[in-house]
Image (tube, rainbow, N blue to C red):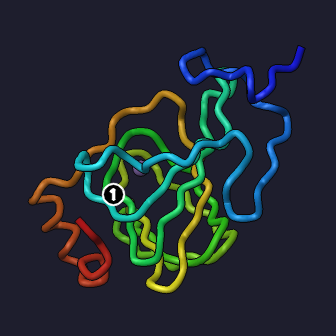
Amino acid sequence: MTPTADEHHPNEPTEAPAPHRRHDGAYRWEQVELLAYKAEGTAPFRDVTRQVLIERPELGCQLRYFEVAPGGHSTLERHEHVHGVMVLRGRGACLVRDTVIELATNDLVTVPPMTWHQFRAGDEEPLGFLCMVNAERDRPILPTDEELADLRRDPVVAAFIRT
Ligand code: MN
């Protein structure tokens, strides 16, 4: 028997999602919860939401949708796990290692292991992107003062990063 949404209770183990979950036209999907990007106060960020679109134990990875509101930014961080990103909505820019990259819809970004990265929306429109990530992953690391000073040696990077 196919489970319905009515039979799902939040404290039960996650059931397999329906084979098809419809997009509602505004970057929300059926049976997908709108989540905080991270717990407030754990790391610097501004105006980012997170939705876990696809996650199954057999996959070993998750597909998430992040949306950065105009003027917002994700955390400047690095970690061993990698990100595979595709821009789905709007425009913005990101830092990967020591390079600031302008982003447009449908662009692809790969973040290798232990590489500094940060995403920012422009002031006019949100930046929405898919992010594929390992299901089991290490905790992000924030830059030390020394590492920040090092990053800021490049004036383009210095002007871009938000902490
Ligand atoms: Mn990351």
Provide residue 136's location: percent of width, then percent of height: 48, 27
Displayed quadrant of residue 47 = bottom left
Provide residue 19's location: percent of width, then percent of height: 85, 34
Relative to 114, 14 lies left or right: right
Badge 1: how crowded within 10 Å, few (<14), some, or many (20+)? many
Q: Nearer the viewer, residue 131 or 110?
A: 131
Name the residue carrying label 1.
Answer: 75
Ligand 1 within 8 Å of the CB at mark 1: yes
Callout 1 amino acid: Thr
Element on which disc 1 rests:
loop
Displayed quadrant of residue 105 = bottom right
Q: Residue furthest front?
A: 6
The residue shown at (67%, 26%) is 56
- Give the vertical position of 157 relative to 133 (above or below): below
Relative to 123, 162 lies left or right: left
Provide residue 37's location: percent of width, then percent of height: 43, 50
Provide residue 7's location: percent of width, then percent of height: 73, 20
- Give the vertical position of 146 relative to 19 (above or below): below
- Give the vertical position of 30 relative to 1 (above or below): below
The residue shown at (49%, 44%) is 82
Q: Nearer the viewer, residue 120 or 77?
A: 120
Quadrant of the frame with the C terminus: bottom left
Quadrant of the frame with the N terminus: top right
Relative to 122, 142 lies left or right: left
The residue shown at (42%, 45%) is 113
Q: Nearer the viewer, residue 158 or 34?
A: 34
The residue shown at (38%, 67%) is 73
Q: Residue furthest left?
A: 146
